[in-house]
């Protein structure tokens, strides 16, 4: 291995959880849960294969039936789902890994087919452009129903209950999914939040839902076991904010009060005009605002990931599709070995193909 000490391979104390390296597996929807959205033995094998990650963050897992918006995605609100997740966490821990559950409510990124014909809920009745992915094909999004103010405490409670379920299922902690245009992000950004109650209007009001969810989850399971993911530049899922620097600057500054396990920032998933708001990338911009552990995610390769750590842009670097395709990514980075290519055709749904069959390093011939 080379001169550069390869900061990837140094350990990191994540609020008391010792991570052996700084290569994080990003949350990725794979749409392979079993009946009842229950995780299976196959899912357990997939995560176990990736247990050498500094930390695994699970795919988005629904906090309630209301939070569902994709077929075959796992939940964490029923007993069966908790039992299913126990298989996953046991497999990961037996392989000396660490895993957080990502808590997900999709809000308007859903369709009545997931809700017995009822409308999906959102902060406001604003229809997203695009189509929902359903078991019977793509269907145009609908205009969601705006949550009543009185319903909001119940949704926050669903997050807290899901967090307790995650700990009962053996997870080391949870990540609140506040990114990528799902429910929490829909509250934060002003293109999707047109509310006139205390959850809408000012930046402070739009940040309130995210902060109340964070407080409830941290109270339920401990702030040291609670992380949150945000995407302050994303236009994915038809999102926009008129002043993301101000909106997310306020929210991130407020998050300091909780002393969370981490803040996880996503660079844009798509090419976006909103990046003009930031001089460099999102992590660099908010590094000075957030006091705690920062994870950065977004199309890093080995070299740019090492650079992000060397330049102190973040403490940990998360990889998505490279992790999907390389179960032993930290070992490959250590050896500067060749990488398997992710196969898009098998990202969502299906069986073991493109899920359990990506080869480990010793099985591949070439090492650079
Ligand atoms: C997706 O399935 O495309 C997806 C799910 C959750 C995300 C982002 C993308 O946060």
Image (cartoon, rainbow, N blue to C red):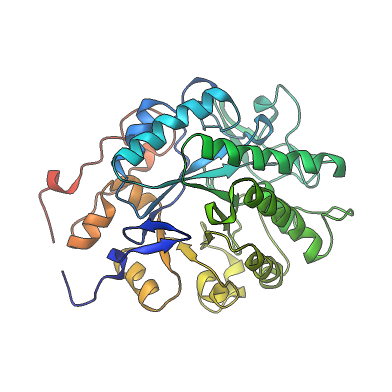
> Total label count?
0
What residue sits 53% from the left and 38% below the top?
166
- Quarter holding residue 240: bottom right
Rendering quarter of residue 141: top right
Which residue shows up at 35% across the image and 70% down it?
Answer: 304
Camera-side residue of 271 and 215: 215
Q: Looking at the rendering, in which quadrant would you find the N terminus? A: bottom left
Residue at x 66%, y 55% (from the top left corner) = 239
Vertical position of residue 4 compared to residue 15: above or below: below
Q: Is residue 366 left or right of residue 305?
A: left
Left or right: residue 353 versus residue 181 is: left
Residue 304, visible in the rendered structure? yes
Q: Relative to 337, does residue 311 appear above or below in the rendering?
A: below
Q: Position of residue 157 (x, y in %)?
A: 72, 40
Q: Position of residue 151 (x, y in %)?
A: 82, 39
**Residue most extreme to the left:** 365
Report the quarter where the C terminus lies. Answer: bottom left
The residue closer to the viewer here, 69 or 6, is 6
Residue 340 location (% of width, % of height) = 24, 49
Q: Nearer the viewer, residue 20 or 1?
A: 20
Q: Is any atom of residue 236 visible in this view?
A: no
Q: Which quadrant would residue 259 be assigned to in this image?
A: bottom right
Residue 22 x/y as whole percent: 36, 62
Left or right relative to 130: residue 96: left
């Amino acid at each position: 291995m080379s001169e550069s000490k390869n900061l990837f391979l140094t350990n990191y104390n994540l609020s008391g959880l010792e991570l052996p390296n700084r290569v994080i597996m990003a949350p990725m929807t794979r749409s392979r849960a079993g009946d009842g959205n229950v995780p299976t033995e196959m899912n357990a094998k997939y995560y176990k294969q990736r247990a050498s990650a500094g930390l695994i963050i699970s795919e988005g897992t629904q906090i309630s039936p209301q939070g569902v918006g994709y077929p075959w995605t796992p939940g964490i609100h029923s007993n069966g789902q908790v039992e299913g997740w126990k298989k996953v966490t046991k497999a990961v821990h037996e392989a000396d890994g660490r895993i957080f559950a990502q808590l997900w409510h999709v809000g308007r990124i859903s369709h009545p087919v997931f809700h017995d014909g009822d409308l999906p809920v959102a902060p406001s009745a604003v229809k997203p452009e695009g189509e929902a992915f359903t078991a019977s094909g793509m269907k145009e999004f609908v205009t969601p129903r705006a949550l009543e103010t009185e319903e909001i405490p119940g949704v926050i409670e669903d997050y807290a209950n899901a967090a307790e379920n995650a700990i009962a299922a053996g997870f080391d902690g949870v990540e609140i999914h506040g990114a990528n245009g799902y429910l929490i992000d829909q509250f934060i950004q002003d293109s999707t939040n047109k509310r006139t109650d205390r959850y809408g209007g000012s930046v402070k009001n739009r940040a309130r839902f995210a902060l109340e969810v964070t407080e409830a989850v941290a109270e339920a399971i401990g702030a040291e076991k609670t992380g949150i993911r945000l995407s302050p530049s994303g236009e994915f899922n038809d999102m926009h904010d008129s002043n993301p620097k101000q909106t997310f600057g306020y929210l991130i500054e407020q998050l300091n009060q909780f002393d969370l396990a981490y803040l996880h920032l996503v660079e844009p998933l798509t090419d976006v005009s909103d990046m003009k708001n930031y001089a460099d990338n999102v992590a660099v911009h908010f590094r000075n605002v957030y006091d705690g552990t920062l994870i950065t995610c977004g199309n890093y390769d080995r070299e740019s990931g090492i650079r992000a750590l060397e330049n102190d842009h973040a403490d940990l670097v998360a990889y998505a599709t490279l992790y999907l395709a390389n179960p032993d990514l930290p070992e490959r980075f250590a050896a500067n070995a060749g990488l398997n290519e992710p196969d898009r055709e098998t990202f969502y749904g299906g069986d073991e193909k493109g899920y359990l069959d990506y080869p480990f390093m010793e099985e591949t011939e070439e090492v650079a």
